[in-house]
Amino acid sequence: MIDVLDVHTHTIVSGHAYSTIREMARAAKKKGLEVLGITEHGPRMPGSCHKMYFQNMRILDRNAYDVDILFGVELNVLDEAGRVDLAEEELKAMDIVIASMHTPCMAPLSKNGNTWAILHVMENPYVNIIGHLDDSRFPVDYETIVKEAKRCHKLLELNNSSLLPTSFRPNAKENNEKLLKQCKKYEVPIVINSDAHVDTSVGEHEMAKKLLQEVDFPETLIVNRSYDELKKYINRFQSSL
């Protein structure tokens, strides 16, 4: 399959990642990518940056090594109400925004509670992608979330890191199979991301692609095939925001 982008990655700014912006961009170029998203962890993640880092992103060049760079954030979902750790003031300046549930920032709730947290997050007009919905510590109702993603025009992520042998997210493969089944049923697009925390992981999507083949997932529902497809979903190209 055609794969021109990777829009969930982290640099040293996130606190537990190991490469710089330019190292990540250079790696993206070597992988043949057109687009790289650098989405640092939100400020509630231990060791990550202050909100002022996100407020100052306007100074950053959006191209390096002929790779288009999207600067944004992986927000931390904080509670069932769908609160996140940056305000509208910061989010409206982001090229791209992912929102995810992480144990350092949110105690796992019941299946119903976790589902409501994601449903409420999807009401945020600045959130573009829901990240790694595959962690059994945060069980969710996939059908309900997929239907709401379609209504709210959000992308759902297939996270390659979750599928690696080193992953700490339990039952990720089985959970992603459930997610993909519902996305296929309701024709909801997904984005494959590496969730790279080091430059050597940029563009590593092999485990995700293998799973997509196993479940016979249609390529027409994978936005990685075209930057123009991604543009339909992300803040940088939404004139209404």
Image (cartoon, rainbow, N blue to C red):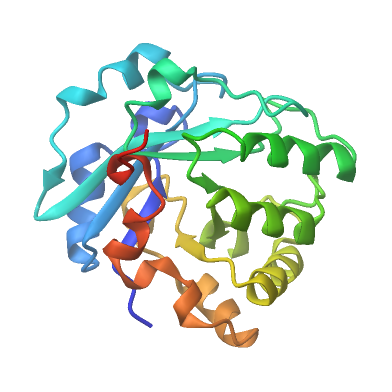
Vertical position of residue 36 compared to residue 173: above or below: above
Q: In the picture, residue 59 is in which quadrant?
A: top left
On screen, residue 81 versus residue 220, left or right, reads right
Q: Nearer the viewer, residue 20 or 127?
A: 127
Q: Is residue 202 visible?
A: no
Q: Nearer the viewer, residue 60 or 203?
A: 60
Which residue lies at the image location 32% right of the left edge and 61% below the top edge? Answer: 5
Q: In the picture, residue 162 is in which quadrant?
A: bottom right
- Report how many numbered discs are placed on residues in the image: 0
On screen, residue 99 versus residue 126, left or right, reads right
Residue 222 in the image: state x and y as whole percent: 46, 71
Which residue lies at the image location 81% right of the left edge and 35% below the top edge? Answer: 108
Residue 107 in the image: state x and y as whole percent: 79, 28
Q: Nearer the viewer, residue 143 or 59?
A: 143
On screen, residue 38 versus residue 82, left or right, reads left
Q: In the picture, residue 99 is in which quadrant?
A: top right
Which residue lies at the image location 71% right of the left edge and 74% below the top edge? Answer: 181
Which residue lies at the image location 53% right of the left edge and 52% below the top edge? Answer: 153
Q: Nearer the viewer, residue 126 or 4?
A: 126
Q: Is residue 171 visible?
A: yes
Quarter of the image that includes the N terminus: bottom left
Residue 24 in the image: state x and y as whole percent: 26, 47
Quarter of the image that includes the C terminus: top left
Residue 178 in the image: state x and y as whole percent: 75, 69
Vertical position of residue 44 compared to residue 217: above or below: above
